[in-house]
């Protein structure tokens, strides 16, 4: 969960790269990049052994991702670009590293 964050997306035909920087709920700076294969097939996450993700486009403006470990859903996210392209709504829910469930919605303004 974040107090503040900036997202940068790079979209190609077969990969969506999401780079984030921000301040987490503990006040610490975080940064990282996640790559999604929006083909509707399972793909491993290099940074999380045993976790598989399925990502797909739901229409032209929504990217949906589900993460599973041992067949159990541990996280879900959607990234929806508004029809005017000015805002991105990120909805995330899942289980954090301590086992606590979380749900967060962040609305980003386009720079």
Image: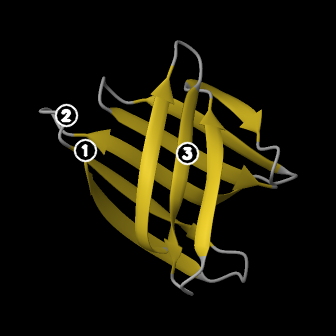
Kindly identify the residue that appears in the image at 12 percent across and 33 percent down: 84
Question: Mark 1 or 3 closer to N-term?
Answer: 3
Question: Mark 1 or 2 closer to N-term?
Answer: 2
Kindly identify the residue that appears in the image at 77 percent across and 44 percent down: 45
Kindly identify the residue that appears in the image at 59 percent across and 23 percent down: 15
Residue under label 2: 85
Question: Mark 2 or 3 closer to N-term?
Answer: 3
Disc 3: CA contacts within 10 A as few (<14), some (14-19) or many (>=20): some
- Numbered circles on residues, count: 3
Residue under label 1: 110
Q: Are marks 1 and 2 in contact (CB under 8 Å)?
A: yes
Where disc 2 sits, the SS reads loop
Tell me: residue 84, above or below residue 97.
above
Q: Do the residues labelled 2 and 3 touch (CB within 8 Å)?
A: no
Where disc 3 sits, the SS reads strand
Tell me: residue 18, above or below residue 5.
above
Q: Could you tell whether 88 is left or right of 96 in the image? A: left
Which colour scheme appears in the figure? Answer: secondary structure
């Amino acid at each position: 969960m974040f107090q503040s964050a900036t997202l940068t997306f790079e979209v190609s035909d077969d990969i969506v790269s999401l780079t984030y920087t921000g301040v987490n709920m503990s006040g610490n700076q975080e940064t990282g990049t996640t790559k999604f294969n929006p083909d509707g097939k399972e793909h491993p996450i290099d940074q999380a052994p045993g976790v598989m993700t399925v990502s797909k486009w739901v229409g032209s403006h929504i990217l949906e991702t589900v993460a599973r470990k041992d067949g159990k859903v541990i996280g879900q996210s959607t990234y929806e670009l508004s029809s005017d392209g000015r805002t991105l709504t990120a909805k995330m829910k899942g289980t954090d590293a301590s086992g606590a469930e979380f749900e967060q919605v962040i609305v980003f303004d386009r720079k």
